[in-house]
Image (cartoon, rainbow, N blue to C red):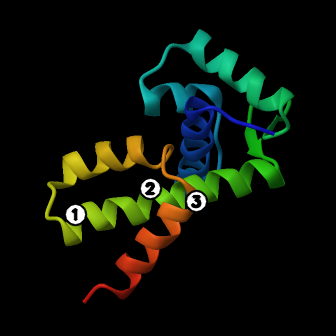
Amino acid sequence: MSIHESGEDYLETILILHKNTGFVRSIDIANELGYSKPSISRAVGILKNDGYITVEPNGQIILTDSGKAKAEQVYERHLMLRKFLTDILGVSSENSEQDACRIEHILSEETYEKLKGFVENYK
């Protein structure tokens, strides 16, 4: 099942919010990303239909196993790229955060693995 960049961003945001608060609703995602409630509602519907999340009767959004796996994959890429940009290249925290968010979606698996190995072994 293929997921678009925006879907990956939503899953990553849900993962982070859940780690921080333990409870995620659509309004929390809207506040975090600065998107409108209708945009969030549409995205939640798509992610739900694709099997990445479930929505409880109380509005809580829960990652499914496949949703959590995808979110963790994207978040791991994000953290590694941010570390590379900040610690190795000396990019500012603000720019490394924004750039990592963009780059995490477009790297091939081969490039990601090579870059990850470089970062892990960098002294």
Give the class, few, some or many, for how many residues have Cα within 10 Å of label 1's Cα (few <14, many ≥20).
Answer: some
Q: Residue at x 64, y 40 (%)?
A: 24
Vertical arrangement, residue 122 with respect to residue 77, above or below? below
Tell whether label 2 touches label 1 (CB within 8 Å): no
Alpha carbon distance from label 3 to label 1: 21 Å
Q: Is residue 58 visible?
A: no
Classify mark 2: helix, strand or loop: helix
Alpha carbon distance from label 1 to label 2: 12 Å
Q: Residue at x 59, y 36 (%)?
A: 10
| Residue placed under numbered mark 2 in the picture | 78
Give the class, few, some or many, for how many residues have Cα within 10 Å of label 3's Cα (few <14, many ≥20).
Answer: few
Q: Residue at x 58, y 59 (%)?
A: 109
| Residue placed under numbered mark 1 in the picture | 86
- Lower sequence index among marks 1 and 2: 2
Give the class, few, some or many, for how many residues have Cα within 10 Å of label 2's Cα (few <14, many ≥20).
Answer: many
- Lower sequence index among marks 3 and 1: 1
| Residue placed under numbered mark 3 in the picture | 109
Residue type of the residue flagged with mark 2:
His
How far across and down, in percent of the image, does residue 102 sit?
A: 39, 40
**Residue 69 placement, left or right of 12:** right
